[in-house]
Image (tube, grey):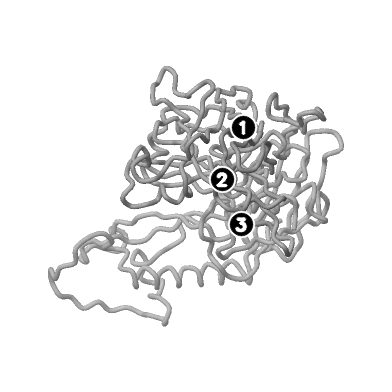
Amino acid sequence: MSDWKNTFERNRVIPPHSQTARQAPGASQGLQLVFKQIDGLHIKQSESPPSLQYQLRVTLFDSGHQLFFGRTWKSGSHSVSGMQGQSSRVLFNEVVYFHTSLCLSSVVAVVELVSLSTRADGSQDAVGSGFGLLQLFTGHADSSISQGEGRLSLFSGTPRALLHPKLKDPLQLNAMLSVMEGSQLLYFIQPHPALIPIMHLLPPNILVSGHDSIPGVVSSTDTGTADALRKPRLLKSFSCVLEGLRVALFPSMEVFESDLLQLLNRDCQNTNRGVEGRSVVVQERRLLVGVHNGWGWNRGVEGRSVVVQERRLLVGVHNGWGWVEKPHVLVLEREAGGSGEARARGASAGSSFRQTSTDKLSDGLSLRGSVELKMMRDVAFSIVFQLHYVFSCPLAGDGQMTSTAVPRAAFMQCVRWCAWSLFSDPEGPGENVCLNLQGSALPNPWGVMVYSASTEQIC
């Protein structure tokens, strides 16, 4: 597994609710959370094994839509100080960073205290020991972030209580759950504008620690704190130019598109796409005559079937966490044949590499011109390609219209994608590089379903 794929699969996140995202007041803001300690824990000697330790887990929560989103951050394991049977303390001193544009009072951080113990077989047992809601934003435009030091009271139970259908307001927790008397989490929150230079490398709503490895960010050389995000620094970037990209589809362009269109036409007929969202009534009765091959209507009935309107290639740089910059949208053209040369060259010294196509790729799609990308020399940086088809299909209309007059609607579908890890894959930058495009429901950076068929290649 490549470094990019490993990083990508570890850092997948749950997106926020679409309505909440539309309410975002402005640009993304960086925040710093410091969890200092928990005071007032009451640990019974009969319930505490010698290996007992505690951990904090933090997740963003949209109280307006009862939705957890982003990714859960987990602290290290920390021991309890104090005598068993008495009020105890757990020192954390952990720092969490993230940035978000969802500076709304309905967006809170759910902080869960988890007890960790080791079973007889050596495995670890994690049990929730209480949770609290940390108010991140005030809802005021002049000072949206809740700044300063505070103490957070904890409730007994687990954060799953926030998903109860009767709980429409988190403030109702006081009436539904019992408070852990005397137990409080000491924390500190403040803006962290130092994240601004690296926001293109770290997606929003992801909680991270300063020791987490973020591709493109220089690791900390401070052996004392190892906090690379307190004052983050970027790796040096260079330009990469891709020229002469060509896409070949198996077994041929004609067969691939013919099979795809037959499936789409059959799907449109089965789902009545032309009258989607409308009530069906009998207006008049007509006899329609056409040629059908068992999969779909003959393409001779042009205007009455799904057709390919445009073929696009989306190309962007991804660091395993997110897009380094917005992907380029390139229009591909059908080619009749012949062989060419695909080249990708780096602008920095010693970073040049070359791709050469073969005569086998004579029937496919080609890109006229070139595309320039910003790269960083990190094993997790990859160039990601997505083959995107734009289709048009007929809308419900008057049957007396001619085929050219039937109103049509366009829709898009991802049919293939691949990632090229320049600095980690064995093939690496070099000559005769051929990348396998893939489909099916595998996770991908766009988070979309991809058409499934045989393997294709891009060169």
Between 199 and 193, which is closer to the camera in this rendering?
193
Q: Could you tell me how far apart the alpha carbons at marks 3 and 2 are, in whole angstroms?
A: 25 Å
Q: Which numbered circle lies on residue 362?
A: none
Name the residue type under label 2.
Arg
Choose the circle earlier in sequence order: 1 or 3. Answer: 1
Contact between labelled residues 1 and 2, with CB atoms less than 8 Å apart? no
* Vertical order, 129 against 192 (above or below): below
Q: How far apart are marks 1 and 3 (CA)?
A: 46 Å
Quadrant for the C terminus in the image: bottom right
Q: Earlier in the sequence, mark 3 or mark 2?
A: 2
Few, some or many C-alpha atoms within 10 Å of disc 3 (few <14, some 14-19, many ≥20)?
Answer: many
Query: Which residue is painted at 50% across and 42% down in the image?
Result: 131
Q: Position of residue 456 (x, y in %)?
A: 65, 65
75 vs 446: above or below? above
The residue where tag 2 is placed is 71
Which is more toward the observer, 330 or 130?
130
Q: Assess disc 1: are there few (<14), some (14-19) or many (≥20) residues with their C-alpha within 10 Å of its C-alpha.
A: some
Which residue sits furthest left? Answer: 283
Residue 337 location, quadrant = bottom right
Placement of 16 over or under 300, stated as above or below: above
Image point (73%, 39%), residue name: 240
Identify the residue under disc 3: 417
Q: Position of residue 221 (x, y in %)?
A: 82, 29
Task: Determine the secondary structure under disc 3.
Answer: strand
| Mark closer to the chain start, 2 or 1 | 1
Taking the spot 62% from the left edge, 27% from the top edge, the residue there is: 195
Instruction: Identify residue for label 1.
Output: 37
